[in-house]
Image (cartoon, rainbow, N blue to C red):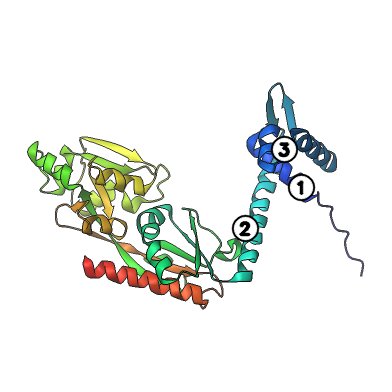
C-alpha cells in the first residue's frame, strides 16, 4: 500500500514572523517582539509568501494591511500557534508535576477565587496554580485544563461533576448609600422603591446571563414595569459589585460572589428577601484529572472555603 505524500509545512519561524506581523500590522513592532531586525522579519514574510504562492500583506505607504489570503491564513495560523504554545508549556510542566490549571468565569475568578488563593498557597506551597478566566466554554482535554468551575443550570450539569454551591440573588448597596437614601427621604422598604434609585446593571446585549438581570429578579419579587431613577451599565460583574461597594448605586448581588462583601459590612442586602436560582456552581473535571493529587487537594480546599462561608453567613 502506497501512503499518500505528506503535504509540505512552512518552517515554524516563518509562521511566527507572519503571525506577529499580522497581529501588529507592523514589521517594526513584530521585529521588536521577536528580537529580530525589521529586514529579517520582512525576509521571513517574503519567504512565506513564496512558499504559499500568494501575497499575504499589502505594503502601503507607512501602513501594512492583510490581503484576503493573509486574513484567511492569519485566522488559521494564530489559534494553531497558541495551541502549540499552550501544549508545549503543559508538557514542560508535566515534567515537574504539581501544576494545576483551573478555568472559571472572569467574575468568579476576580470576586471569589483570586482573593482566597493565598490561603491555598499557604496550605499547598508546592502546587503551582494557573487560572484561565474566560466566559467562553472551553474543551478541558484539548486546552490542557484540569478543572473548570462553572455556574450551571440544573438541567445541564455534566456527569461526574461535583456541586459546590447554589446561587441566590438579592438587591445590595453600600451602608453609605443606604444612609444617604434615608437622609434624602428616598425609601428602600420594598423592591418597588427601587424606582427612586440608581440601578447598577450588567451589560448583556446578547442575553447570555438573563438570570442576573433586573427584570427577571423584579418579576420574581412581584414587581412589574419598574422604571428606576437611572442606570449605570458595566461589562463585567465584578465591576457592578465594585461600583456598589463604592456607593454608586444598587446592584443585583449574587450571594455566591458578593457574600464576602456582606460579611465584611461593605454591602448590605435589602428587603430581607433572596431569590434562589435553579443553578449552582460545579466543579467539572478533564478526563483522568479528577484522581490527580493536585486536583483532589484543590477540590478539598474549595469545599472547605465554601463551608467556612456558610458557617460565617
Q: Which residue is mark 2?
A: 86
Q: 10 Å neighbourhood of mark 2: few (<14), some, or many (≥20)?
A: some
Toward which corner of the image does residue 182 lie, by quadrant? top left
Residue at image position (50%, 70%) is: 126
Q: What kind of element bears circle 3?
A: helix
Toward which corner of the image does residue 14 lie, by quadrant? top right
* 312 over 169 or under it: above or below: below
Q: Position of residue 236 (x, y in %)?
A: 39, 46
The reply, left or right, for residue 159 in relation to residue 33 is: left
Between 122 and 154, the one lying in front of the other is 122
Q: Position of residue 73 (x, y in %)?
A: 72, 43
Q: What kind of element bears circle 2?
A: helix
Q: Position of residue 284 (x, y in %)?
A: 47, 68
Name the image quarter holding the C terminus. Answer: bottom left
Q: Which residue is mark 3?
A: 70
* Chain-order first, disc 2 or disc 1: 1
Q: Which residue is mark 1?
A: 13
Q: What kind of element bears circle 1?
A: helix
Between 305 and 144, the one lying in front of the other is 305
Q: Is residue 157 visible?
A: no
Q: 10 Å neighbourhood of mark 3: few (<14), some, or many (≥20)?
A: many
Q: Position of residue 127 (x, y in %)?
A: 50, 69
Residue at image position (88%, 61%) is: 4
Real-space Cα distance between discs 3 and 1?
Answer: 17 Å
* Chain-order first, disc 2 or disc 3: 3
Q: Is residue 19 visible?
A: yes
* 257 over 205 or under it: above or below: below
Amino acid at each position: 500500500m502506497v501512503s499518500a505524500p505528506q503535504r509540505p509545512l512552512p518552517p515554524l519561524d516563518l509562521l511566527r514572523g507572519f503571525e506577529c506581523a499580522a497581529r501588529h500590522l507592523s514589521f517594526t513592532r513584530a521585529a521588536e517582539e521577536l528580537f529580530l531586525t525589521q529586514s529579517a522579519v520582512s525576509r521571513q514574510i517574503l519567504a512565506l509568501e513564496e512558499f504559499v504562492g500568494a501575497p499575504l500583506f499589502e505594503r502601503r505607504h507607512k501602513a501594512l494591511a492583510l490581503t484576503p489570503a493573509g486574513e484567511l491564513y492569519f485566522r488559521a495560523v494564530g489559534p494553531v500557534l497558541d495551541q502549540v504554545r499552550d501544549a508545549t508549556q503543559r508538557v514542560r510542566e508535566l515534567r515537574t508535576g504539581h501544576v494545576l490549571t483551573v478555568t472559571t468565569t472572569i467574575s468568579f475568578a476576580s470576586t471569589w477565587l483570586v482573593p482566597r488563593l493565598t490561603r491555598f498557597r499557604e496550605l499547598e506551597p508546592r502546587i503551582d496554580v494557573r487560572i484561565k478566566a474566560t466566559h467562553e466554554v472551553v474543551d478541558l482535554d484539548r486546552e490542557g485544563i484540569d478543572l473548570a468551575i462553572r455556574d450551571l443550570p440544573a438541567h445541564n450539569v455534566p456527569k461526574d461533576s461535583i456541586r459546590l454551591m447554589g446561587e441566590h440573588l438579592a438587591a445590595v448597596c453600600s451602608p453609605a448609600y443606604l444612609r444617604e437614601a434615608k437622609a434624602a427621604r428616598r425609601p428602600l422598604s420594598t423592591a418597588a422603591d427601587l424606582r427612586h434609585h440608581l440601578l447598577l446593571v450588567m451589560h448583556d446585549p446578547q442575553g447570555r446571563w438573563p438570570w442576573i438581570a433586573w427584570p427577571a429578579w423584579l418579576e420574581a419579587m412581584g414587581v412589574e414595569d419598574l422604571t428606576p431613577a437611572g442606570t449605570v451599565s458595566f461589562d463585567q460583574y465584578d465591576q457592578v459589585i465594585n461600583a456598589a461597594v463604592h456607593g454608586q448605586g444598587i446592584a443585583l448581588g449574587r450571594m455566591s460572589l458578593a457574600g464576602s462583601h456582606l460579611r465584611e459590612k461593605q454591602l448590605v442586602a435589602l428587603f430581607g428577601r433572596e431569590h434562589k436560582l435553579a443553578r449552582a456552581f460545579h466543579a467539572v473535571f478533564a478526563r483522568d484529572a479528577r484522581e490527580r493529587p493536585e486536583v483532589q487537594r484543590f477540590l478539598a480546599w474549595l469545599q472547605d472555603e465554601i463551608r467556612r462561608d456558610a458557617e460565617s453567613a
